Image (cartoon, rainbow, N blue to C red):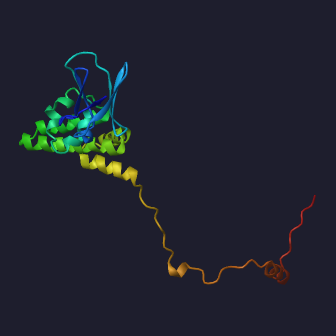
Amino acid sequence: MTAAVSKTCLVSFDKNKYSVCSRAVGRPVEVQAYADRIVLRQDGVVVAEHTRCFGRGETIYNPWHYVPVLTRKPGALRNGAPFKNWVLPSSLEQVRRKLREGALVAHDKRSLSDDGDRQMVAILAAVLEDGLLAVEAACAEALSQGVHSSSVILNILARKKDPAPTVTIITPEALHLRHAPVADCARYDSLRRGSSWKEPTFSP
């Protein structure tokens, strides 16, 4: 069956609502219901998959579906329904907590809190491009260095994606060979004949 996608990225099915990727808003999706899960596709592409809910009036969110929306409304990370009780991997969660703690000790709490939200959203958005494992590893590396800003974490990610170029060593002109050496055994033999050097002999 097909179903409409609301402006809040939700699809209604069997008296419950399920989130889909934000890019799916505005066009219908195909709902495939199984005994244990719900799969939603748009143009043949999976835009959501959830454990099936058999209750009534429930809303089932996947917070990652809403990360692109956060780039426009970063404050929703603190109080948006999809992000309540969101459990992140360890290093990502530590970064989020440190960014929040920074806001609590600031004189201008509102502005720093907004900045912390924007930084965390930038890190979360990187997951959509680089993958969760890569971003989690970058967060862990930054924390090991005693920092947690988005600029450092994104720089670590960029460095791992684009390794430093190979260094080309330029040979000084003075060290260039003007005449390539030629192997000449006859010359070696002539040197031996012209010297008084004798090959040593060994007694048995």
In the picture provided, is 38 more to the left or to the right than 166?
left
Q: Residue furthest right?
A: 204
Please state the horizontal and vertical placement of residue 48, each as a whole percent of the image.
32, 32
Most foreground residue, 112 or 45: 45
Q: Quadrant of residue 87?
A: top left
Q: Quadrant of residue 165?
A: bottom left
In the picture provided, is 185 more to the left or to the right than 70?
right
Most foreground residue, 51 or 162: 51
Task: Say above or below: 166 vs 115.
Answer: below
Q: Quadrant of the N terminus?
A: top left
Q: Quadrant of residue 191?
A: bottom right
Q: Residue furthest front?
A: 1
Task: Say above or below: 48 vs 178.
Answer: above
State the residue at coordinates (83%, 84%): 194
In the picture provided, is 9 more to the left or to the right than 187?
left
Please state the horizontal and vertical placement of residue 6, each as a whole percent of the image.
19, 34
Number of numbered tags placed on the structure image: 0
Q: Residue furthest left?
A: 108
Report if residue 89 is visible in the image: no
State the residue at coordinates (79%, 79%): 188
State the residue at coordinates (15%, 42%): 73
Please state the horizontal and vertical placement of residue 155, each as a whole percent of the image.
31, 51
Report if residue 177 is visible in the image: yes
Q: Quadrant of the C terminus?
A: bottom right
Q: Residue furthest top?
A: 55
Most foreground residue, 193 or 154: 154
Most foreground residue, 102 or 37: 37
In the picture provided, is 198 more to the left or to the right than 149?
right
Please state the horizontal and vertical placement of residue 196, each as a whole percent of the image.
84, 80
